Image (cartoon, rainbow, N blue to C red):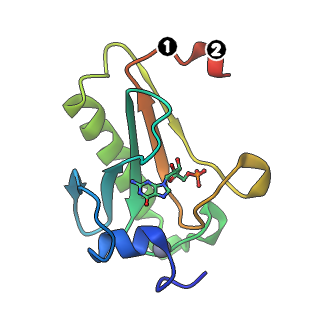
Amino acid sequence: MTPEECIFCKIHKGLIDSEILYSDDNCFVIRDISPRAPVHLLVIPVLHITRLVDVNIQDAHILGGMLKVASVMAIRENIVESGYRLVVNQGENAGQVVPHLHLHILGAKSLAAMG
Ligand code: 5GP
Ligand code: ZN
């Protein structure tokens, strides 16, 4: 899939409507359109990267930035004390639907039963 066809690239360019909760040079954050927890955010790199194995060493700082932004969002959403889960689905067996790397932040309910 090219960046021109990609849902997350289209959202970043403003071609598809979605509230951007956070944005910097490396990544941006939106709410998941079909949330599986009361807090379900997606941290998405601006660069159209499909999988973690596709990240070049020159771009590796983007991953650290995404984790830092996830912490900022967890504080903003008030889920630090109650706990939350970070998930990166990679490929078909993991159920990755959107072929643009993204970090799920799930919280504000017990996720223990979800495995
Ligand atoms: P994946 O299964 O690829 O890890 O997760 C993709 C996520 O993107 C899914 O949880 C899905 O609900 C979410 N998603 C797909 N299309 C859109 C969209 O157009 N807007 C938003 N906000 N989320 C989307
Ligand atoms: Zn993309």
Residue 110's label in the rendered image is: 1
In this view, the residue in front, 12 or 71, is 12
Looking at the image, residue 105 sits to the left or right of residue 93; the answer is left
Looking at the image, residue 42 sits to the left or right of residue 2; the answer is left
CA neighbours of label 1 inside 10 A, class few (<14), some (14 to 19), many (20+)? few
Q: Describe the element under mark 1 as helix, strand or loop.
A: loop
Q: Describe the element under mark 2 as helix, strand or loop.
A: helix
Please tell me which residue is depicted at 59% across the width and 14% down the height of the picture. 112
Q: Are marks 1 and 2 in contact (CB under 8 Å)?
A: yes
Residue 99 vertical position relative to residue 19 in the rendered view, above or below: below
Looking at the image, residue 79 sits to the left or right of residue 21; the answer is right
Residue 46's label in the rendered image is: none
Residue 113's label in the rendered image is: 2
Q: Type of residue at label 2?
A: Ala
Q: CA distance from mark 1 to mark 2?
A: 7 Å
Identify the residue at the far right of this view.
93
Please tell me which residue is depicted at 25% across the width and 39% down the height of the picture. 72
Please tell me which residue is depicted at 23% across the width and 55% down the height of the picture. 19
User: How far from the left and from the top, in percent, is residue 58?
Assistant: 46, 75
Is the residue marked 2 within 8 Å of ligand 1, measured from its CB? no
User: How far from the left and from the top, in percent, is residue 38?
Assistant: 38, 26
CA neighbours of label 2 inside 10 A, class few (<14), some (14 to 19), many (20+)? few
**Quadrant of the snapshot with the C terminus:** top right
Please tell me which residue is depicted at 29% across the width and 59% down the height of the picture. 18
Is the residue marked 1 within 8 Å of ligand 1, measured from its CB? no
| Quarter location, residue 91 | bottom right
User: How far from the left and from the top, in percent, is residue 27?
Assistant: 33, 62
Q: Type of residue at label 1?
A: Ser
